[in-house]
Image: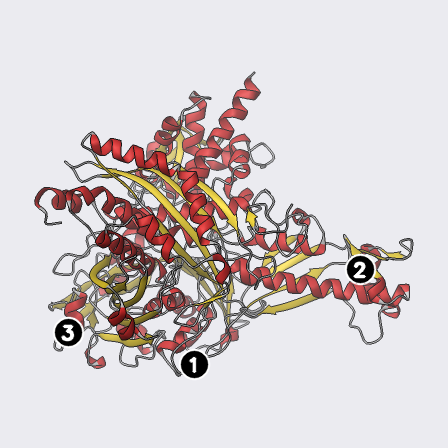
Amino acid sequence: MTAATGDAGNAGAMGRNLHYVAQKRRVREDRRFVTGTGKFVQDVTLPDTRHAAVLPSPYPRARILSVDTAAAEALDGVHMVLTGQQMAADCNPIRLGLKLPEVKWYPLAVDMTRYAGEWVAIVVADTAYIAEDALALIQVEYEPLAPVIDPEQAFAETDLLVHPGHGSNVLYHGHFLWGDVDGDFAAADDSLSFRARWGRSSTVPIETFGALARWDAGTEILDIWASIQMPNFVELLASTLGYPLNNIRLHQDVDVGGSYGVKRGIKQSVLVAYLARKLRMPVRLIEDRLVNMAGGDAHGPDRIFDTDVAFTNDGIIKSLKIRALDDAGAYPGRAPFQLAKPISAIVGPYTINSVKYEAISVATNKTGQVPVRGFGQAPTNYMIEMAVDAVARHLDLDRLEVRRRNLIPSDAFPYRIPSGSDYDSGDYHTVLQKGLDLARYDELLQRRDKARAEGRLAGIGIATCLEPGGGNNIFEYLMDPTAEITTFMEACEVKVDPQGRITGMMGTTTSGQGHETLFATILGEELEFDPDEIRIVHADSLSALPTRSPVASRMAIMLGGAATGAAGKIKDRAMAIAAFNLDRPAADLEYSGGTISDRNDPSRKLTWAEICFIAYRAYHKLPPGMEPGFHAQFVFQVPGGGQLPDARNRVQIYPCFSFQAHIPYVEIDPGTGKVSVLDYAIAHDCGTVINPDIVRGMVIGGLAHGIGAALYEKFAYDGEGQFLSASFADYLMPSVHEIPDVKDVEHCTPSPLTSHGQKGSGEGGYLGAPAAIASAVNDALHPLGLTILELPMRMHKIEALINDGSG
Amino acid sequence: MSQREINLSINGKTYAAAVEPRLSLLDFLRDHAGLTGTHVGCEHGVCGACSILFDGVPIRSCLMLAVQADGHAITTVEGLCNEDGAPGPLQDAFQEAHGLQCGYCTPGMLISAQALLAGNSDPSIAEIKDAIGGNLCRCTGYVQIIEAIQLAASRLREAGQ
Ligand code: FES
Ligand code: FES
């Protein structure tokens, strides 16, 4: 085990020998999943549970003239039919990220529908089958209205408004300037402009959203089990229902069947909570797939970039002017903030001197946008990489060489970018070279050129991208100066029981990231116990210490930091007990696997069992003033930053920056426009890898997700606002046949800011793959003089581009 | 609604029940037989999360009615475990290779892999891809799933020697 920068997953950090961190060890969560004994929300059963089903609106924009529920209510087995009007009378609008008082978001449409698929009514019945039967009996009278679908039109529109009370469709419009952009453009040899479009897709977990609620009239506690991954979920639920926060108990030991950002489910949870209390019986709502896709509020960014790039004749990029117009759909939630996160890495891994950034979020008559893996960074990385490729093309320089000229050199860290982030550490040139070696880049070039000589369309993609991890949420302040939020903490509690066994308590659900393994590994490392013997539990929201949930590639950094902190307190306590009982100064004592001994006389020692006995049973042997018992809590603040932006909007939002180099190889069938991804190499650096299998899975899984966003996945609407992608047959997620054999390699540049040198890894593959695939497709089209700057690059688009130049 | 009597075997155990004719086999397994290992992903036959073995053949239980299972033998993911509920050999290989993340597609993947390995202990990558081609996984990108199936196959071959 080495302690230096270099080859990983087995690289140590901070000059320590590691026993469990970075070792190939099984992922503890896997056992319950392979045996079919995971506990997903749909697996939680309570006696007398009733089942809900929702009625979607067929119109993207319509006045609701009347809702007749009589026939549905009369159906045998139906307990209640709730309409938007009734719901709104008893709840507050769901709080949005930005303060937009006239954008009122209720769980069910009130008076007006704002997207095709918006929920208009909900039925509760003995079974889901009966509830769905009843939906067909609800009579709704609509007056259809013209919708606003195109985001540019929405931006300019003054009459056709999604939320008339708001006065326009613009939810956010901000201007940022970092550095002397005009000066840099004037001094540059050359410049170019392009438009790139990121299509509306999302993470689309295989499990839809579901929630189950029970109101306990005796304790006056609302119990809720939900497929949730969201900071502030309970706060939002409480504010919408008008409950005190401590009346709600979210059960966080529910397994979540994938999320990657989107499992927000707030309106769903408000509905079941309300109905359960009203009916005095547990109520559950499990979205079916069609309902989920159309109206589950789980779409992702949908963004148009207009970018100007200034550069020298050598291909050194000096400055960027970016206009990003994002289509948030009808109800924005936290969507606008997805324009703000990328500010933390607005120049990517490059030494770009200055940036102008105009960010616009508009409402349209589409399903609402929620946070998606990377929180807006994937579209931004795509745009930045397209800029680098465009410069190379313009100057007729090699794309690789242009990247090498612009990548931040390894001796420049910590590196401050114009928008104020200090990139913590990195070795971009080495990682890129590792990727090239893994891809056998020279052979790949020959393979491409041979394919071209044989008349095929072949291309190599290159993308070098960043993954910010562990953010402090200060981006809210950048968009809303009344939001003085400067922490996004994570906490844990560690208990040692009278037997000496260790239990770690975390406070959030988990959705495939292996947090229990992460937590146990770090506790084992720090306390020198086998992680497999450490129990990890998910405390419910009333019992848990503060958590901000597994968003923002943060858990390795944040839960890792909290676990290390709590383990340190446990050791300190053990030391204090030993020092008192051995009558030696703590400085003379040594901790090893729970036993504490005198360095000078190892026969003088206190075993772990003895320490535990004293802590729980022998008050007279505790140092004076020490409380009995053996546990520790630790609340970890995001490292670095913690301050509001300066007068020029410069701020540290994310502490850690992981890096990846993607090199795919594609061929395109000119007849059909079908892109085949035939090879893929990725070199990845997230500092110290806590568990190699988990990180590898995240990298490759994210990459596959990115291939989907690049080539297949789209929530499509027609010009009239009808939703066209409600089923898996229309949305098109990649199957195993669309994913190539991926070659991957890790590099380790430890972060100086984290407990073991780790950085985030949950988003990285996804943050670079769309850019890399777009780069490869454009390389393949280059001999034809064609480019495509719109995702997804579905086959009919490419076919049209090749065969009539229209795209 | 009128009910129909059905008798079937699930994981070697006999079940008798009266069900509505419209009840899906998937909902029967989960809500009536209490076997929640089989998952619901799309209910329109694309994702494969609901896969089970039906007389040894992998099928999608969301596309079948419970009454159609009358007189047939079904294996679900729970039936791949050892007697004591511990992971069976294929499940153990998925653990070892970390062929999963959130675990939601996993039961369906295991069923498809089980069907493959039952007839072929030395599958090529192309054969593995064909076997799981109808199972969507959002988490893994499939690579570690393929590796898990390869590991299970190699252990199977070793055990057979
Ligand atoms: S749930 Fe049966 S195939 Fe998706
Ligand atoms: S492991 Fe999550 S969907 Fe496959």
Residue B160 visible within the image: yes
Element assignment for label 3 = helix
Q: Which amino acid lies under the numbered mark 2 shown in the image of this protein?
A: Cys
x%, y% of residue B49? 38, 41
Q: Earlier in the sequence, mark 3 or mark 1?
A: 3
Q: Which amino acid lies under the numbered mark 3 shown in the image of this protein?
A: Ala
- Which residue is at the far left? A804
Packing grade of label 3 (10 A; few <14, some 14-19, many >=20) is few
Q: Which residue is found at the position 33% from the left and 40% from the top?
A: A735
Vertical relation: B63 (above or below) A41:
above
Q: Marks 1 and 2, how far apart in space?
A: 49 Å
Q: Earlier in the sequence, mark 1 or mark 2?
A: 2
Residue denoted by label 2: A612
x%, y% of residue A515? 54, 54
Task: Please identify, in this view, whether the residue under mark 3 or under mark 1 is nearer the observer.
Answer: 1
Q: Mark 2 lies on which chain?
A: A
Residue denoted by label 1: A646
Mark 1, ligand 2, within 8 Å: the answer is no
Q: Which chain carries label 3?
A: A
Packing grade of label 2 (10 A; few <14, some 14-19, many >=20) is many
Left-right relation of A103 to A508 = left
